Amino acid sequence: MNVATPIVVALALAATVSGGLPPVTAHGTIRQLVRQRDTAAKVALTEVLRTPHTFGLGSLSDLRGEITIADGSAWLSYPPAAAGDAPKVVVSSDTPERAGFLVTAPVDPSRWREVKTSTPISSDNLESVLVKLVTETGLGGGDLPFRIDGHFATLTFAITDGRKLPPGPTSEDALKKANYVQTEADVNATLIGFLAAKPDERFTHAGTRVHVHAVVEGRRRMTGHAQAFKATAGVRLWLPAGSQ
C-alpha cells in the first residue's frame, strides 16, 4: 500500500466539502422506537425511492423485518415464518412496503470517494476508524453515509421480529432478544451505514454513533442489520464528498 494515498484522498475529499454533503434524512427515530415502542409506519418506500441513488437503512413498520437501500434498490428481509424456515429476502425498486424507522441519503456515484485505511475493519473498531477518517478528511461535524465493499471472514445478520416482543414498553435488550440472528463465514458483502454527528439515538442505538446494515448478493442473497463482522484485508471504504 502506498502510504501517501490516504493523504491524497483526504485532500481530494476536503476540497469538495464546500459544495455541500448529501442530506441525511430520518423518518422516525431509534429513540421513538425503543423508548416509546413507536413502530407505526413513518414513510412509504416508494416515496423515498423516487430520489435517485438513495442509500438507507431501517426497519419495516411494526418491526416486521429490515430495510437496506442500496443505490435506489430496497432490500427487504423478513424473519422466518416458522421455526426451521429461512428468512425471506425481496429486492425491489418499487415496493409498497412502509418503514417504521428509516434513515436515508442520496449519493450520486460521482460523489463517492474511496478512503484508504491500514486498520483492519471490524464491528468493534468501525466507529473509531470512521471518526478518525472524517476528522482527517475535513468531513467531521455532520451526519454521513458510508459504504464498505469487500470480503468478510465473519458477518452476523440480525433481522427484527416484532412477533417475539412481549407486550408493553420495550428496551434495547428486548429488541436484541427478539432478533433472528444468522452468521455467515467467508462472504463478499457491501456494508451500508451512517455515522451520526453525536450519539443522540436519532438513527443509531444507545451509546454509538454508527448504524450499519449489510447486503450479500448472488446465491447467498441476504440483508439485515450488521450485528457483528470482521473484514479481511483489501476491503474498500467509501465516504461522500461534497458536490463540485
Image (spheres, rainbow, N blue to C red):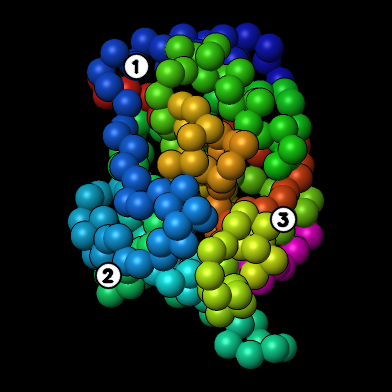
Q: Amino acid at mark 3?
A: Leu
**Residue at 68% across / 12% down in the picture?**
3
User: Which residue is the site of mark 1?
Assistant: 17
User: Which residue is the site of mark 2?
Assistant: 94
In the depicted structure, whether residue 78 falls above or below residue 186: below
**Residue at 45% across / 57% down in the picture?**
36
| Circle on res. 110 | none
As measured in the structure, the alpha-carbon distance from the residue carrying label 3 to the one carrying label 1 is: 32 Å
Q: Amino acid at mark 2?
A: Asp
Q: Secondary structure at mark 2?
A: loop
**Residue at 72% across / 23% down in the picture?**
118
Q: Quadrant of residue 145?
A: top left
Q: Check disc 2: other Cα within 10 Å, few if <14, some if 14-19, many if 20+.
A: some
Taking the view exactly as shown, the residue that stands out farthest to the front is: 168
| Secondary structure character of the magenta stretch overall | strand
Residue 120 position within the rendered picture, expressed as x and y whole percent measured from the top left: 75, 32
Q: Read off the magenta span.
A: 179-188
N-terminal-most mark, 3 or 1: 1
Q: Secondary structure at mark 3?
A: strand
User: Which residue is the site of mark 3?
Assistant: 155
Residue 46 position within the rendered picture, expressed as x and y whole percent measured from the top left: 24, 65
- Marks 3 and 1: CB-CB under 8 Å? no
Q: Quadrant of residue 185?
A: bottom right
